[in-house]
Amino acid sequence: MENEVKLAAGAMVALAVATAALVVLPYMQVRDIPKPPALKPYTSAQLRGREVYISNGCVYCHSQQPRARSFGPDFERGWGRASVPGDYFYDRPHLLGSMRTGPDLFNIGARQPSKDWHLGHLYQPRAYSPGSNMPSYPFLFDVKDAAEDGEEVLTLPPGYAPYGRVVVPRPEALDLVKYLQALNHTYPVLPPLPTPAPDVKVQPKAETAAPKS
């Protein structure tokens, strides 16, 4: 019985230490971090697109956390500066990701702002990135004989469009692309350097003669 008590006590202590180190201390460090001034909240359409991003498992193959230059070549890959906690001010839940089967998407909205490119890439990735192992998402599109009023028609590279028919993105695809376009964290996160004040020349005071005694 004594061994069981020691085992349980040791397990509780180990759990308490791990919780303090991995949950409590990180929370205390980032709970009051303000957002960068240039960071904008998501629109309703972007939030819907974020849900599409989550539901289709994009986070399993794409990260959203470029590393500092001392930890990896992310900047040289064109993925942008290292992320900081304030960049995720509006993210609930955070989509940091831990796998990079595909490129980091922290700044995909800056690297690739074209809506047509994103829509076509979702419909058939290999039409835009030969050899890509990204799955296609045809269920986010409708293939029709003709588009209806107000519908957008997807423009695909030669050989990828269905013969005699048109591809129309569904609202989920349009929202997902709006979310991807919103992933643009190219704003500065450090305050600008203070501007030195102009030199002000101070006129020397005239010396006053000491009163004669």
Image: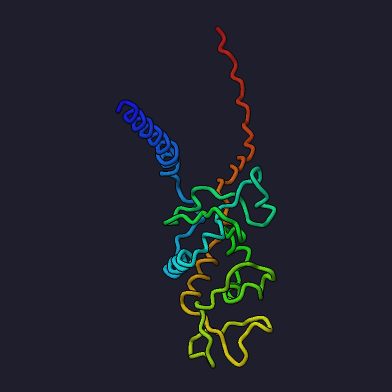
Q: Nearer the viewer, residue 66 or 161?
A: 161
Q: Position of residue 178 (x, y in %)?
A: 51, 70
Please state the total of marks drawn on the protein image.
0
- Residue at image position (62%, 46%) is 68
Q: Nearer the viewer, residue 193 or 173?
A: 173
The image quadrant of residue 111 is: bottom right
Quadrant of the drawing holding the N terminus: top left
The image quadrant of residue 167 is: bottom right
Q: Given the current orientation, which residue lies at the most extreme front position? A: 1
Q: Given the current orientation, which residue lies at the most extreme top position? A: 213
Above or below: residue 99 compared with residue 116: above
Q: Position of residue 212 (x, y in %)?
A: 57, 9
Q: Position of residue 104 (x, y in %)?
A: 59, 58
Quadrant of the drawing holding the C terminus: top right
- Residue at image position (44%, 43%) is 30
- Residue at image position (40%, 38%) is 19
- Residue at image position (51%, 60%) is 59
* Colour theme: rainbow
The image quadrant of residue 202 is: top right
Q: Nearer the viewer, residue 171 or 18?
A: 18
Q: Position of residue 166 (x, y in %)?
A: 57, 88
Q: Is residue 25 left or right of residue 131?
A: left
